[in-house]
Image: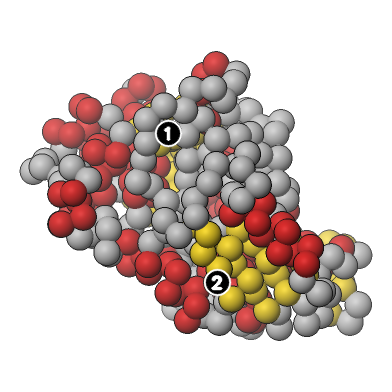
């Protein structure tokens, strides 16, 4: 059962803070459990931080950070949504919470149940922590190619982690298909199914999209994101297009993925090349992406993305992932294509701490021929 209510906004706000609309809250009731998911999230402009009732209510309401050097270089306002500041460390906390709340409301996830998911890591981390906070076990099926930091972290969080060889989606031993079988075989098990469960994109429609809209004072002209499940891009796109149909929605795709092919040519047959990026690079159109208007797509090379990764670290002080850098490359490309004066937002997906053994390891970069060489922003011409 769902009921709508409102949260009263403070009468006085500190100077410089935008005044959000009244905050709509969706209230879910599942047997004797009542919980809330904010549809328009705001820290209520609290100058000293805000208070929550626990882990789950701390998800979302992340800062929007101006990328200073890139904004100055392009003549646009380029903003990064600091999703690495979610309590589980990534944008996937939002999807994890949204999927669990939706499953509780529908009865698909019962008290004391087990959440099962196939994940490249971050959604698994979000599900493990949300599960801990709400009283569930978590079983994670993860490709053995993912970073050691993610796999070790999941185990430390109490998840039952099962690594499998990386296989294409069509293979019955693909990690997603394995996770579905494990869920079916698990007593009181619930398959999160992040790729095709539209509770994923609904979480971003209800939270990430409104946050970006009001944080940019309703002036956003473009949004850029890469695709893993498609939930972030789709949910934010659906919300922003409702507010202003002229907002440009762009997919930033690594080589080896097929979303660029789908957006540009209407099929997923072009998936040449390869990428070391984790958590993004989709080969099919998931249910989260169905019916969503995406205006353009760019392909971003790993070598350029690594240059951006180290620019963000050494110039902006942002220690983030390669998927974050790919997103920022896409934002810069949109800025250059559309000209000065645009207001562009993108997603800083997760922290670089999950990739220290790879992206921040000089030997690993050298082995992959990805050692950054730029001293300034000259690499922007290669995006």
Identify which residue, 33 or 110, lies in the foreground: 110
- Residue 37: percent from left, percent from top: 71, 65
Dot 2: element? strand
- Residue 17: percent from left, percent from top: 47, 59
**Position of the C terminus by quadrant:** top left
Residue visible at 61% across and 43% down? 171
Residue visible at 32% across and 61% down? 355
Do the CB atoms of the residues marked 1 and 2 lie less than 8 Å apart? no
- Residue 318: percent from left, percent from top: 28, 58
**Position of the N terminus by quadrant:** bottom right
The residue carrying mark 2 is 161
Q: Is residue 88 in sight in this rendering?
A: yes
Identify which residue, 139 or 209, lies in the foreground: 139
As drawn, 225 above or below 342 = below
Give the mark count.
2
- Residue 350 vs residue 141: left or right? left
Dot 1: element? loop
Q: CA distance from mark 1 to mark 2?
A: 27 Å
Residue visible at 11% across and 41% down? 374
Tell me which corner region of the image, top left, top right, bottom left or bottom right, holds residue 127.
Answer: bottom right
Please tell me the numbered disc located at residue 151.
none
Tell me which corner region of the image, top left, top right, bottom left or bottom right, holds residue 326.
Answer: top left
- Residue 145: percent from left, percent from top: 42, 56
- Residue 93 vs residue 242: left or right? left
As drawn, 343 above or below 293 = below
Residue visible at 38% across and 47% down? 277
Mark toward the start of the polypeptide (1 vs 2): 2
Mark 1, Cα crowd under 10 Å, few <14 / some 14-19 / many 20+, is some
Mark 2, Cα crowd under 10 Å, few <14 / some 14-19 / many 20+, is some
Please tell me the numbered disc located at residue 256.
1
As drawn, 296 above or below 163 = above
Tell me which corner region of the image, top left, top right, bottom left or bottom right, holds residue 354.
Answer: bottom left
């Amino acid at each position: 059962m769902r009921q709508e209510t409102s949260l009263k906004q403070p009468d006085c706000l500190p100077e410089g803070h935008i005044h959000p609309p009244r905050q709509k809250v969706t209230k879910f009731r599942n047997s004797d459990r009542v919980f809330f998911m904010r549809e328009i999230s705001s820290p209520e402009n609290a100058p000293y931080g805000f208070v929550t009732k626990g882990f789950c209510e701390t998800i979302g309401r992340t800062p929007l950070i101006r990328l200073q050097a890139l904004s100055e270089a392009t003549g646009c306002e380029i903003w990064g949504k600091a999703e690495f500041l979610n309590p589980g460390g990534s944008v996937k906390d939002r999807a994890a919470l949204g999927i669990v709340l939706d499953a509780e409301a529908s009865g698909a996830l019962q008290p004391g149940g087990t959440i099962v998911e196939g994940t490249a890591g971050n959604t698994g981390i979000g599900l493990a922590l949300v599960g801990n906070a709400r009283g569930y076990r978590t079983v994670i099926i993860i490709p053995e190619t993912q970073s050691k930091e993610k796999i070790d972290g999941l185990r430390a969080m109490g998840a039952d982690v099962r690594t499998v060889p990386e296989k294409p989606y069509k293979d019955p031993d693909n990690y997603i298909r394995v996770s579905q079988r494990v869920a079916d075989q698990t007593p009181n098990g619930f398959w999160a199914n992040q790729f095709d469960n539209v509770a994923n994109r609904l979480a971003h429609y209800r939270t990430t999209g409104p946050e970006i809209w009001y944080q940019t004072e309703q002036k956003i002209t473009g949004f850029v994101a890469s695709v893993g499940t498609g939930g972030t891009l789709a949910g934010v796109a659906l919300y922003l297009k409702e507010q202003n149909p002229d907002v440009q929605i762009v997919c930033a795709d690594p080589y080896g993925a097929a979303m660029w092919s789908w957006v540009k040519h209407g099929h997923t047959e072009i998936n040449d090349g390869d990428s070391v990026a984790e958590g993004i690079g989709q080969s099919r159109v998931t249910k989260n992406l169905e019916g969503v208007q995406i205006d353009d797509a760019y392909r971003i090379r790993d070598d350029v993305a690594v240059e951006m990764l180290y620019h963000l670290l050494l110039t902006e002080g942002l220690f983030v992932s390669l998927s974050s850098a790919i997103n920022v490359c896409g934002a810069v490309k949109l800025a250059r294509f559309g000209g000065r004066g645009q207001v562009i937002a993108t997603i800083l997906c997760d922290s670089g701490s999950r990739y220290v053994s790879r992206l921040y390891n000089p030997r690993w970069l050298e082995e992959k021929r990805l050692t950054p060489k730029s001293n300034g922003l000259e690499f922007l011409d290669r995006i």
